[in-house]
Image (cartoon, helix red, strand yellow):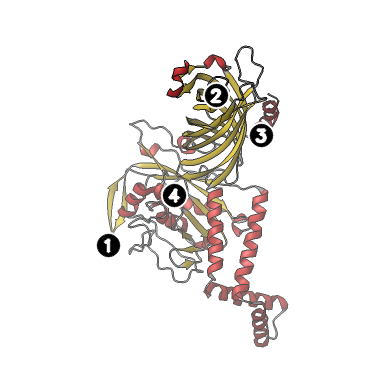
Amino acid sequence: MKYIRNLLPLLYLLIITSPAMSEVRFGIMGGRTEYKLHLDKQDTQETKFSDKKGLAVGAVLDLGINRYFDLSFEPMYLKKGAEKEFQDMEIGLIKSSITTSHFEMPVLLKLSLNKYGINPYLVGGATASYLLDAKEEFGNEYLEYGFENEVDIKDDFTSTDYGYLYGGGLSIPIGNSTLFVEGRYVNGLADINNIEGSTTEIMTEGWQFLAGISFQLGGGNADIMKQDAGGNDDDEDPRDTPKPHVYGEEIDGKVRCIPEFIVPANPCRFDTKPVNSYMGKICYIVFPGSKWETTSPVPKIREAQELYASYCIYLNFEEKKVSRKVKRKMELWYKIWLDSLRNSIIPKGHEKGIRKEIKAKNPNFTQQELDEAVEKRIESKLYSSTMPDSLHEDFRQKMLGLQQTCYRGCKGTLVVFMDQYICKNPRPTRVSACQRDFNQIGIVFLDNGSKNILAHELVHLLGKEKPDIPGGVTWGHHEICREEVNYCTRGKWWNTYQFGDYLTYENYFEIIKNKAGVKLFKRIK
């Protein structure tokens, strides 16, 4: 019991230092067990035990404590036992098989190494079990000596057992569910020998190999759409839907939706179409160290909200934060990445040559004017040059890692506001864009001056059938009517661009149908 008592202060400390249980998951699991019994001293019959295979089925309830730890309750039904050999003075060596059935309740602390992506994790904790039945089986060759094929030996064992366990596993998120596999070692601490007159201590030990699936029930931000969606009565008027908003900011909500609105349809004619109302949620992050930290992205978010609200699509945007430690790492990586980009295109020797050339043509420049002219020339060169593939891949991997870090509560979507953004769909681009194979949008600081830039990229993202399967009319496809938000004739990516104000029928219905392959929207009746 002292092992279990030592765990309680640690669990208490973890729980009280967490603001709230951030996530609740429920699931089922099953698998194989390998148990045996062991004796503290050898008995007169020279009894030996070896592993016996069994099965385990149960449920799992995970309560998120913070980004690293979960508290897990796992009630299960399982088989234990052992293969037994002992010596009889008259018969000789006798073999039998002991099978015990238990209801067991492990309480575990789970340490996740990458909680929001493909996650290797460690588990450890305490377990207690209640004996349901126990049988000992003998082969037919022992019948002539008075043995029975099966003997009830439940009274030979105590009804309860307890111990500790530890192990590890791997979990893989798939949408709102998570698949996992796990292995753990279990060691009993109680003497389960209940044979009258026996002084030999018998304890259990074994392995559990489990697999299962869990689903998010709530906690953290899981219920955010439910909280914001308002009433859902059948007679609710879509126009009474609560205003969309930015978390931590207030939106004026001047644009309101009507059940029938005017949309442009090809070729550039206008018509009306009845629609339903929807409420959705998307997460966003301001990349540490970017200019967006001093110029808020909220006006660009409001701009997108108002366009979609006019089509009865009410988008909530929630800002994701990272710890100071992670923020410092991100800032350092981005500085190194930008320096690598600059040095790969403009080596130090070339920069000196540019400076010398400008100074020769403008001998009257002050030092400040010279520095500004050099930076302007370098910036122009950086804009128009091809980026090395290695830097593209490095950027892509970092953005994929950021997606996994911000996964919880984001419905698999993320908008990243940063100074430069790299996308490869299929060719590399250095502009605000939507990734093809995961649901992420990047908005570069240059596009702070581009009208409806976020609304445009949301057409591409929301219309995708799945993260890696583009939609038919919303992906890699620009409309032909200048008034439409998906119309684009942007030439040089380093120039701002003014997108239109309308969705087409096709855009709207593909967005509502596909929802980026995840459950982004909730219909408001």
Residue 486 in the figure: left or right of residue 189: left
Residue bearing mark 2: 92
Q: To which residue does mark 4 refer?
A: 306
Residue 391 pos. (x, y %): 56, 66
Q: Which element is circle 1 on?
A: loop
Q: Position of residue 453 (x, y in %)?
A: 46, 59
**Residue at screen point 45% across, 68% down:** 427
What residue is drawn where x is 33% and y is 51%? 510
How far separated are the C-alphas under marks 3 and 2?
56 Å
Residue 110 shows up from this direction: no
Q: How packed is label 1: few (under 14 Cα within 10 Å), some, or many (20 or more)? A: few
Q: Give the labeled residue for mark 1.
A: 267
Q: Residue furthest top?
A: 196
What residue type is disc 3 on? Leu
* Of labels 1 and 2, the one closer to you: 2
- Look at the numbered discs 3 and 2 and tell me whether their residues touch, using CB distance below 8 Å: no
- Considering the numbered disc 2 on the image, is that residue within a helix, a strand or a loop? strand
Q: Nearer the viewer, residue 317 or 311?
A: 317
Residue under numbered circle 3? 14
Which residue is at the far front? 90
- Indicate which disc, 1 or 2, sits on the residue closer to the N terminus: 2
Q: Which corner quadrant of the image does residue 478 belong to?
A: bottom left
Between circles 1 and 3, the one closer to the viewer is: 3
Contact, mark 1 vs mark 2 (Cβ under 8 Å): no
